[in-house]
Amino acid sequence: MRYMATYDFMETLRTTNQWLGATAQAIGSYPAVAMMPNPAFQWLAAWGEVTERSFSRMVTKPDWGIYSVVGEDGRDHIVEVDVEVSKPFGDLIHFKVQGRKEMPRKVLLVAPMSGHYATLLRSTVVSLLPDCELYITDWHNARDIPVSEGKFDVEDYTLYLVDFMKHLGPQTHVIAVCQPAPLTLAATAYLAGEDPKAQPRSLTLIGGPIDPDATPTDVTDFGNRVTMGQLEQSMIQRVGFKYKGVGRKVYPGLLQLSSFIAMNADKHTKAFSDQVNRVAKGEASEHDKHNKFYDEYLAVMDMTAEFYLSTVDRVFQRREIAENMFEVDGKMVDIGAITDVAVKTVEGENDDISAPGQCVAALDLLTGLPDNLKASHLEPGAGHYGIFAGRSWRNNIRPLVLEFIDANSGPRLVADSEVAKPKKAAG
């Protein structure tokens, strides 16, 4: 499948379905149709509207849609999304709140590169913005990156995080959500060995596969059921001529989306048919619950082939992070070298993507970190999405994370050759 023809074939199918939806909506919406009322035409227009919207969203990067935030003074403050650091494969962006003093909590939110854009964490951003000076990694769609920019694998990803942490400074608190948790831990360990003063003050790892074998799930165990050759042959394609990244090997977003939907096909089919009925009855709206969810869920991005394959190979199959044998740029990364960065893990009891045990495994790897700088939390009844964006996050986890950040803020009381004095970490 490593050909442009297969990539273009998927894009052709998507474009055709988008066109069919738009055509059906137009036919069902002709004024002349209203002269002879027929539910079939209403249903046709509704099916067309939902279909066109669904397939057009698959290639559209969602907007952050965060325009203001209420400050401590009770006033709305305009939010600007500024690019703090620009790189070929991803930017560091800052949610700059106009007219508000810089907040004492400086937080770097590390977004996943797993098929969706960083906007998947929009609700997480909204919940943290009133209380934090917030930054986030904004990864780029690989289809839009020219081949001349070179490769991007797990080592490059880790070095990007290292650069972002250095840029923000040592008083930063890092929160990594899901997929980037192992590489964020590795980036912190890399700094511990190469530039200890640039390490963040704290690191919160949420639902990440530090040790995928600790409690295997269908998702994390996938890499053990296939060979790398099978993965490359079945998942990797070359970007077609339509995009700037023409010729680049990628794991296409449309292919990823088909896998996402297949996992819960019945649920998505029902949601689609129910929305068609709501539109036909005039009960739907532009920003209703269905559109709000699927505008984000269907918006997918391509990953570079080398990032996808090296993630499966090194994080899931060879378990280099779990075994503390990860190498970056020819240098062995020792997680035990982290001695003064407070680390907290967060897991959901019902997480079927990164099950309980996979993330908390990080604490056992931190052999050089005092126990009072380690913390963990298992959220009862919470699934994967809930621990960073759902009710569990808003009501329980977010307050705990902010408490953990506050308990580990302030200057490092450490000489150049000494290990930092441990501070008590919030549980």
Image (spheres, helix red, strand yellow):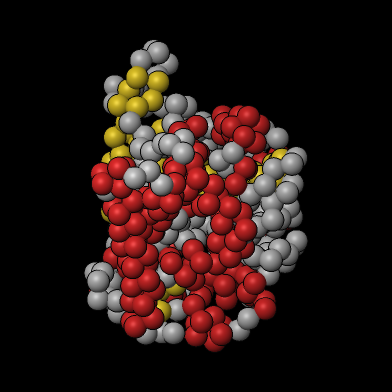
The correct choice, above or below, for 334 with respect to 345 in the image is below
The correct choice, above or below, for 381 with respect to 13 in the image is above
Residue 68 image-quadrant placement? top left
Left or right position of 379 against 414: right
Left or right position of 120 against 244: right
Quadrant of the image containing the C terminus: top right
Q: Is residue 144 among what the camera can see? A: yes
Please state which of residues 231 and 193 is positioned toward the viewer in this rendering.
Answer: 231
The correct choice, above or below, for 246 with respect to 393 in the image is below
Quadrant of the image containing the N terminus: bottom left
- What is the tally of numbered marks visible in this picture? 0
Please state which of residues 205 and 272 is positioned toward the viewer in this rendering.
Answer: 272
Residue 219 image-quadrant placement? bottom right
Q: Is residue 362 among what the camera can see? A: no
How far across and how far down the image is residue 277, in percent? Answer: 50, 45
Name the residue located 47 percent from the left edge and 27 percent from the top edge. 131
Please state which of residues 288 and 227 is positioned toward the viewer in this rendering.
Answer: 288
How far across and how far down the image is residue 309, in percent? Answer: 51, 75
Name the residue located 67 percent from the left edge and 76 percent from the top edge. 224
Name the residue located 30 percent from the left edge and 26 percent from the top edge. 78
Name the residue located 57 percent from the left edge and 42 percent from the top edge. 388
How far across and how far down the image is residue 107, in percent? Answer: 46, 38
Please state which of residues 293 and 274 is positioned toward the viewer in this rendering.
Answer: 274
How far across and how far down the image is residue 288, in percent? Answer: 46, 37
